[in-house]
Amino acid sequence: MAKNVPVIEAEPRDRIGTRYSKRLRQAGRLPAVIYGHGTQPTSVSLDAKSIISAVKHGTHVIELRVGGSSETCLVKELQYGWMGDDVIHVDLTRVNLEETVRVSVALTFIGQPEASKRPGAVLTHDVQQLEVECKVRDIPEGIRIDMSQMEGDVMTVAQVKMPAGVIAVTDPHYAVVRVVTVTEEAEGEAAATTAAAEPEVLTAKKEAGAEGAAAEKK
């Protein structure tokens, strides 16, 4: 986890509803709800730029200041508009630094695998994030995948070097990086195309038909 947990000011929100939430967003704020630790959910609003910037930089944990008090919160979920491009609501969960949680962490790919240097080889990233389990204080901002250490054509979740105190929850057999040889696929497609098209058979039928017609004339 980042050494400096971002501090975001929150304002209590005593009103709910679509119209009120829309006015908040137009004013540069996002409606949010804080859950957890046996207390009633608290409705607040956050500065939109601050929370979105923090999340884009891989932040999972924030210090939320509400009415003079401070709470450590985990960004649990971002809700998007119907077009999927704008954040319209944030769900937060109260946590302490020693609590074990599950979160999704973004992957960063560096280096080049030896297998990708073959003629016709194409490198593919099957996943962009992994679900992990760890204490709140150990949540990483991201996980670096060094593809130069990759052996063979596939790197699975089990082969990813995880940060200290972090355990991958995603299926260990799931492929994170793969190298595919395009020439083999192209040959397979060509064979399938040849099998599907049968111009010789059609020609033979036409010739047979022509010979039959000639025989009848005789």
Image (tube, rainbow, N blue to C red):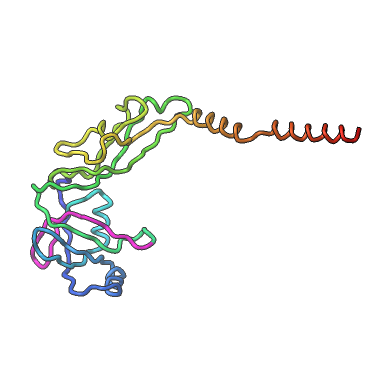
Residue pictured at 24% horizontal, 48% vertical: 58
Q: Residue at x 21, y 39 (%)?
A: 168
Residue 139 x, y percent position in the rendering: 17, 45
Name the quarter where the C terminus is drawn.
Answer: top right
Residue 114 lies in quadrant: top left
Q: What stretch is highlighted in magenta?
A: 64-82
Q: Position of residue 169 (x, y in %)?
A: 22, 41
53 is within the stretch colored magenta: no
Say how many tags the image has: 0
The image position of residue 110, as x and y in percent, is: 32, 34
Image quarter for residue 16? bottom left
Front one among 15 and 175: 175
Instruction: Quarter of the image for the N terminus: give it.
Output: top left
Query: Residue 155: x percent and y percent?
Result: 31, 31
Q: Which residue lies furthest to the right in this view?
A: 218
Residue at 36% x, 39% y is: 126
Q: Answer with the quarter of the image where residue 175 lies.
A: top left
Q: In this view, does 18 lie to the left or right of 188?
A: left
Q: Nearer the viewer, residue 210 or 83?
A: 210
* Residue at 48 percent of width and 31 percent of height: 182
